Image (spheres, coloured by chain):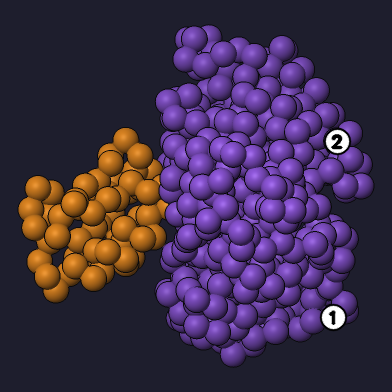
Amino acid sequence: MGDDIVNSWRRGQLPGCLEDLMTTNVSIPQYRTDIYSTQSILDPYPHYATLRALGPVVWLPHQQVFAISRYADCKAVLLDDETFVSGDGVALNPVANRLGRGTTLNSDGDEHATKRSVLAHRLTPKAVRKMTSAVQEKAEGIVDAALSKQSVDGVDDLATALPMSIVPDLVGWPEDGREDLLRWAGATFDSLGPVNRHSVAAVKGAAEMLAFSRRVVRERSVIPGSMGDDVLKAADENKIAKSSCPALMIDYLGPSLDTTIGAISGALDLFARHPQQWQAIRQNPDLIPNAVNEVVRYESPIRAFSRRAVRDVEIDGSRVPKGARVLVIYASANRDEAEWDDPDAFDITRDAARQLGFGSGAHGCAGQGLARLETQTMLRVLARRVERFVPAGTPKRAVNNVIHRYERLPLHLVAAEGTPL
Amino acid sequence: MRINVDWDRCEGHGICADQAPKVFSLDDEGELHYAFDNEEIPDDLAASARSAIGVCPVAALREQA
């Protein structure tokens, strides 16, 4: 539908009802480059800079969506959840939007609040505070193992190891379904992209994950006392529909892995390339909480999600028609030169608390308390025990429509003096 | 300036307390406390209070019109 409108604008033939849009919308620019080609996925930031320069709202003919790329506009869209709804899905293709029905991610208003209340309280800072010593212990063990190898893959050996040792237990995912978990979770994200070969290939993994989750619900094979157990109990008490349980299990499990892996591995890469900032952290670990904000700003583990506009609406002078899908590009907002001084510079001393890497508003990342705990704990343990990280080969980026992270990050760890190897 | 805190929305992330420690604080239990409930926020704290509104990850803080 959106494309028809844009074509009409270009031909100057507007349906009568859209005539009032014409006055402001004649100038909506478009960007014909596919920002989801493999090349763009690997290096998206130049495209985001072009989008920001083109205007507040830019039509993407490949994805048939209006791109929102500037910080202030992204934030305004996220906060106006009555106009820009999630209930028709936040993905860029209709199959994923249909499969995602029943999730917290794809719901609005009271339904969303109810679903979020079932689980989100388990992930708040207050709740995860009880896990602090367990996370610390796991992180120490992971760093022990990494230091004994010295040459490590920052992704596998450090970044992945921590969330994988925490999240599946918290969610209560059965032991026998963990082997494929990371692949499934990555595929689930990938499947939320536009129709391209990546999302098409990912549908299989996403479907496998959903099928496994259905079995977990049917057999009630979650770990007692876990978040998954809460989901089943909420369904027993008719607080939520039984049919939404499988999707709700994935709702919290899927997003808790790749994102945190992206943040931790991104931090390792950034500190390897900015050794002075690592020394600053080692001398003053109180810098770590804001450093994590800056890492999430700089790396933005989730590129973008979409919303649907339920009415004609103006974004910074550009009209978006009712029914259109808008793409909120968090990763672009986090590098907007109108919001950040020298946005492409990594600087742990800047105030990065307002970064949009976790989204914002009603759908703001429910797991950010846990993500912050894991990432901060890992950096604290490393700061005590690792003098510096030395790049030891070419890093490789993962190719995923939604997740922006490393797949491989070869590093050499130099142990701090007095740290036993 | 006054702030409305939506306690149903607040999940205690505490990012506001980092921005405006004299306005918001987290206690040892992880509960958020707002120092100016139904009171004017003093002028010298207004700027930090506004940035606290801006960083709340779940949009639980609103400036009263």
The answer to which of A83 and A336 lies nearer the viewer is A83
Q: Is residue A404 left or right of residue A363?
A: right
Q: Which residue is mark 2?
A: A203
The answer to which of A391 and A144 lies nearer the viewer is A391
Q: Mark 2 packing: few (<14 Cα in 10 Å), some, or many (20+)?
A: many
Q: Mark 1 packing: few (<14 Cα in 10 Å), some, or many (20+)?
A: some
Helix, strand or loop at label 2? It is: helix
Helix, strand or loop at label 1? It is: loop
Q: State the image quarter where residue A35 is shown.
A: bottom right
Residue at (79% x, 46% y) in the render: A194
Residue at (14% x, 60% y) in the render: B1
In the rendered structure, the residue with mark 2 lies on which chain?
A
The amino acid at mark 2 is: Val
Q: Across the whole image, how many numbered discs are drawn on residues?
A: 2
Q: Which chain did the image draw in purple?
A: A
- Labels 1, 2: front one: 2
Q: Which mark is residue A172?
A: none
Between discs 1 and 2, the one toward the N terminus: 2
Residue at (47% x, 15% y) in the render: A239
Residue A183 position within the rendered picture, expressed as x and y whole percent measured from the top left: 83, 43
Residue A78 position within the rendered picture, expressed as x and y whole percent measured from the top left: 49, 49
Q: Which mark is residue A392?
A: 1
Q: Are marks 1 and 2 in contact (CB under 8 Å)?
A: no
The amino acid at mark 1 is: Ala
A152 over A135 or under it: above or below: below
Residue at (79% x, 41% y) in the render: A191
* Distance from the alpha carbon under mark 1 to that under mark 2: 34 Å
A247 over A35 or under it: above or below: above
Q: Which chain did the image draw in orange?
A: B
Residue A15 position within the rendered picture, expressed as x and y whole percent measured from the top left: 64, 40
